Image: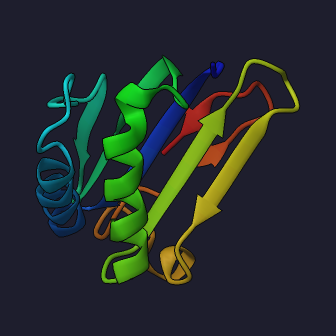
Amino acid sequence: MGYMSTNIFSTTEEGYKRFCELLKEENVGVKYPITKFEVDEKHGNGRVFGFEWTKWYSSDCEAFQRAWDRFTDEAEYPWSRVRIGEETDDTEECYSDDAWDSAGLDSFPLLTLTRGWDICY
C-alpha cells in the first residue's frame, strides 16, 4: 500500500547530526535500513535531505518516520518539511515553531513550495 511522493527536510547542521543519530537507533533490526538520502546537500550552516518520488508509507520508511517524529518532539532544532504527492493538490508544508525566526543562510534553509511545485531553499 502507499503512494509515491517527494519528501524533503531541512534543519541546522547540528540538527542533521542529531537526526542521523536517531535514525541509526531506529534502524536497529530493520531488514532494509535507510543509510543514505537521495537528496543530501549542505547549505550554509544547514542541511537539506530527503527522498524524491518514494513510496513513503511503505514499511521501508517506518524507521525514518519514527526517527523524524522523535526529532520533532525533542524540539531542539529548527526544521522544515515539504511533501509533494501524486496529485497536484496533494502537498504539505510543515515547520517547527521557531523555523521562520531561524531561517536564512547562516542558520538553516527554510523549504517552501513554489507555484510550479518546485521545492525552493
Q: Residue drawn 52% across and 74% down? A: 96
Residue 100's place in the image compared with 90, above or below, is below
In this rendering, would 48 be left or right of 80? left
Q: How is the image coloured?
A: rainbow
| Residue nearest the viewer, comparing 53 with 107 | 53
Q: In terms of image quadrants, where is residue 48?
A: top left
Q: Residue drawn 71% across and 46% down? A: 92
Residue 6's place in the image compared with 100, above or below, is above
Q: Residue drawn 43% across and 47% down? A: 9
Q: In terms of image quadrants, where is residue 51?
A: top left
Residue 37's place in the image compared with 112, above or below, is above
In what quadrant of the picture does the N terminus appear? Answer: top right
Give percent across and percent down for residue 18. 16, 65
Give percent across and percent down for residue 72. 42, 71
In this rendering, would 47 be left or right of 21? right
Give percent across and percent down for residue 78. 40, 73
Q: Is residue 111 visible?
A: no
In this rendering, would 79 be left or right of 97? left
Residue at the extreme right: 89
| Residue nearest the viewer, comparing 103 with 72 | 72
Give percent across and percent down for residue 46. 26, 58
Residue 16's place in the image compared with 95, above or below, is above
| Residue nearest the viewer, comparing 32 with 81 | 32
